[in-house]
Image (cartoon, rainbow, N blue to C red):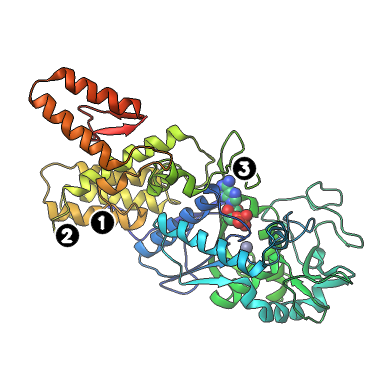
Amino acid sequence: MTDTASLTLFNSLTRQIEPFQPVHPGEARVYTCGPTVYNYPHIGNMRAYVFADVLGRTLSHKGYALTHVINITDVGHLTDDADAGEDKMEKMARAQAQSIWDIAEHYTQAYWADIAALNIRPPAKWSIATHYVPQMIAFAEKIAPNHCYELESGLYFDVSTVSDYGRLARAVTEDGEGRIEAVEGKRNAADFAIWRKTPAGETRQMEWDSPWGRGAPGWHLECSVMSGDLLGFPFDIHTGGIDHREIHHPNEIAQNQAFCCTNGLDVPTNSGAKIWMHNNFLVERSGKMSKSSGEFLRLQLLIDKGYHPLSYRMMCLQAHYRSELEFSWENLSAALVRLKRMIMAADRLAEVAPGDARSPKLVPMLDAFDEAIGEDLNTAVALTALEDVLAAKKVDPAAKRAAAETMDAVLGLDLFGTNRANLRIRPKAAQVTEVEIEAVLARRKQARADKDFAASDALRDELSAQGVEVMDGDPLGWEWRLA
Ligand code: AMP
Ligand code: ZN
C-alpha cells in the first residue's frame, strides 16, 4: 500500500526531486509570485496559478495546514526583468491616460475574476506590493551597509557580496552576459536596483520617500519582503513561472541571503524558501500569448468562443507542470469533451451522499491517485485514476462519490458543482439565441415523430444556415453545436 502522505517535489535549486519536509511540522507555507497588474493576464500567466493551486490543494490533501500567499505587483516591475526599460504600470497608465491606481484596481479585479473562473482557491492572503513599502525600506536599510551601493539612479545590490549568486539560474554572471543591460556605474553586470530614484526634475505617480531619495522599490525587493514578512524565513516553497528562474528569483535569493546575514552555502535556509518550483510555459505558435499582440489569449476570449473556463484548467492538468504545453483550439476542444464526460459521470452521483471511499474496488485507484499526485504532482496520471473511479462498475455509489470528491478536491475540476447544461457556453459571436435553437429543434423532433422527413430536413437546413450543426445521436448527448 502506498503512503498517502508521501510527497516529493522537484526543487529548481538542486534540480532534483526531493521529499517534502516542512519547516514547521504539519504546516506548509507557500509564496507565489503574482501578476503585474498593468494589463489583463493571458492564459499562459494563468497556467502559473493553476499550477500553484494544484500544489496547494495537494499539500492540503496530504494533511498539511496550508498558508498560501500570492502577491499583486502594482509597482516596480520594469518592461525588462533586469533594470532596463520603464515601469510597466507607469507606461500603461500614460498610454491609457489614467491613474496608476485605477489601472491597478481594474486589472487586479480582472485577474481575480479569472482566478475564480478557473476554480483556483483564493490564498490565505493576497499581498499588495504598495501596501508594503515601509517594510521594503526597512529591509533595504538592513541589507544596504554590507550588500548595496548607491548610484545616481538608485540603490543597487552587489551580487558579489553573497555566495554563489545565480545558482538557481545556473547562470554565468560574467560581464557581457547578454541578458542583463548595463547601467552606468554598476559593479557587476548582474547587480540590480532595489530602490529606483525618481530622476531629478521628474515626478512619478507612485513614489515614496526613502533614505536614498524619493522613488520606488525594485520588483525583486517586493517579493523578498512580502514572503519573509508573511511566511517567515525560511518558509517551505516559492513558486513562479520558469522565466523567473533566470533573474527574479536569483535576485530574491540574493536579498534573502543578505537579510538572513549568512554567507555560507546552507542552501535551504539561506535562500528564503527551501524549495523553489517553476511551471513551464504555455506556448502558442502564432504569438497570441504576447500581451502586446492585438487579440491576445485571455481567458475571456476562450469563454467568448464558447469554451467553459474549466476546459482550460483541464488542458493544464493533462500536461505535467514542468513540460511546455502548446495551446491549440483542438487541444482545448478535446479537453472540453473530456471534462464533459467526467461531469456526466459525476451527474449520475448527484443525489448520492458520500460514504466511505475506501471500498475494496476503489482502494487501488485511490492509491494510484495518491502516488501520482505525490510524485511531483503528476496530474495527468491522477486524472486517469479519477476517471477509473467514475467508470467503476458494481461499486457502492456512496463510496464512488466520496472517492471522486476526494480526488477532485485536488484537481479542482468542480465535477459536483458544474453540470452539463452550464458547461455549454454560447459563443459571443453567435447570431441565433439558444432559445431559438431549442424551439427549432423541438419542431424538428415533432416532424420526425410525424415521419415528415422533408420538414425535418428543412428545419435542419434552417439551423445550418445560421451556423448551427444538428448532432443526431451524439454520444455525449449534445444535440447541436455552433459550426
Ligand atoms: P507577470 O504578470 O508577467 O509577472 O507573470 C505572471 C506569472 O505568469 C509569472 O509567474 C510568470 O512566470 C508566468 N508566465 C508568464 N508567461 C507565461 C507562459 N506563457 N506560460 C506560463 N507561465 C507564464
Ligand atoms: Zn515575485
Q: Is residue 480 above or below residue 370?
A: above
Q: Which residue occupies the foreground of this view, 308 or 73?
A: 308
Residue at (71, 65) in percent of width and height:
76
Helix, strand or loop under label 2 = loop
| The CB of the residue at mark 1 lies under 8 Å from ligand 1 | no
Outermost residue on the right side: it is: 185
Q: From this viewpoint, is residue 12 visible?
A: no
Residue type at numbered disc 2: Pro
The Cα–Cα distance between marks 1 and 3, rounded to whole angstroms, is 40 Å
The Cα–Cα distance between marks 2 and 3, rounded to whole angstroms, is 48 Å
Horizontal and vertical percent position of residue 230: 55, 76
Can you identify the residue that label 2 sits on?
A: 354
Helix, strand or loop under label 3 = loop
Residue at (48, 49) in percent of width and height:
299
Horizontal and vertical percent position of residue 250: 69, 59
Horizontal and vertical percent position of residue 45: 55, 52
Among the two numbered marks 1 and 2 on one chain, the one whose residue lies closer to the N terminus? 2
Residue type at numbered disc 1: Glu
Q: Is residue 220 left or right of residue 84?
A: left
Asked whether the beta carbons under mark 1 and mark 2 sit within 8 Å of each other, the answer is yes
Disc 1 crowd, CA 10 A, few/some/many (<14, 14-19, 20+): many
Residue 405's tag is 1
Among the two numbered marks 1 and 3 on one chain, the one whose residue lies closer to the N terminus? 3
Q: Which residue occupies the foreground of this view, 217 or 451?
A: 451
Can you identify the residue that label 3 sits on?
A: 294
Mark nearest the camera among 1 and 3 is 3
Residue 265's tag is none
